[in-house]
Structure formats: structure tokens, C-alpha cells
Amino acid sequence: QVQLVESGGGLVQPGGSLRLSCAASGFTFSSAFMRWYRQAPGKEREQVASITSNGGITNYADSIKGRFTISRDNAKKKVYLQMNSLKPEDTAVYYCKADSGPRFYWGQGTQVTVSS
């Protein structure tokens, strides 16, 4: 059974940091291309970061470039999103997604709220 379980969300003040984790099981994580998305209320889901299977190449949306860092640990079957200098507009539900061959899988999401 495939599972992607996000954690690490919460309430943080503007300028603060959070580290999201996504734990994977049920597929070959080390071969999967991983992505983080977010969806704010009333907005479409948008991709914020991606990382290749070996972690060698990362990409970021312009809106978070320089503030967020995606990484992965294939031994632990986890992907991370380190979020620094958080802004109120970063408030959203954050999802991880795995592209594994012809299939893709989504996590259930974790809420991030940036507010004073």
C-alpha cells in the first residue's frame, strides 16, 4: 500500500521557519521524482519545489526561491522542505507528490499558517 505522510506543519510568525517532512512507503522511493505543492484557500494547487531521484537537481518556484530548500534522504525514504523567512502568503496546505514510473501519488497534506 502506497503512503505519503506529510508532517511538520503548524502556526508560525512571519519571518519564522518550519521544516516539512514527507515519509514514503509502498513504492521504490529512491527511483521517484519528488515534488512539494501547496494550495492556499481559493487558489489552485501550485508546485513549489522538486527534486530528482538522486537529489542532484532541484527546482523552485520563483515565489519561494532563496527561502525554501528541498532535500531527500533515500535511506530514510523521506523528502523535506525547509522553509525560512516565511511570509503570510506562504499560508497553505502543503502536499508532497511522488512520480514513480507511470504512476503518481499524493500525500494528505499538512497545514502551514504564517500569522502574527
Image (cartoon, rainbow, N blue to C red):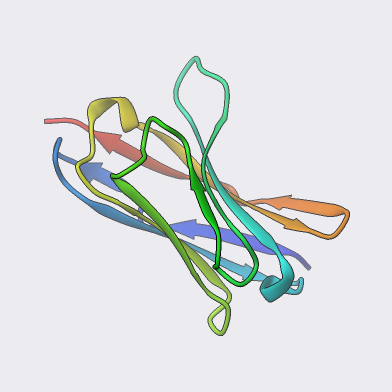
Residue drawn at x 34%, y 40% is: 112
Q: Quadrant of the N terminus?
A: bottom right
Image position of 49 with respect to 81: above or below: above
Image position of 57 with respect to 41: above or below: below
How many numbered discs sit on the rendered protein? 0
Residue 17 screen position, x and y as percent: 21, 50
Residue drawn at x 67%, y 75% is: 30
Residue drawn at x 73%, y 71% is: 31
Q: Quadrant of the C terminus?
A: top left
Residue extending farthest to the bottom is 75
Q: On the rendered structure, is 86 left or right of 7?
A: left
Nearest to the observer: residue 48 or residue 111: 48
Residue 8 screen position, x and y as percent: 36, 57
Q: On the rendered structure, is 110 left or right of 50?
A: left
Displayed quadrant of residue 82: bottom left
Nearest to the observer: residue 30 or residue 38: 30
Q: On the rendered structure, is 67 left or right of 76?
A: left
Nearest to the observer: residue 69 or residue 28: 69
Displayed quadrant of residue 37: top right
Displayed quadrant of residue 40: top left
Residue drawn at x 50%, y 57% is: 6
Q: On the rendered structure, is 68 left or right of 93?
A: left
Residue extending farthest to the front is 57
Residue 72 screen position, x and y as percent: 50, 69
Residue extending farthest to the top is 42
Residue extending farthest to the right is 102
Residue 97 screen position, x and y as percent: 64, 50
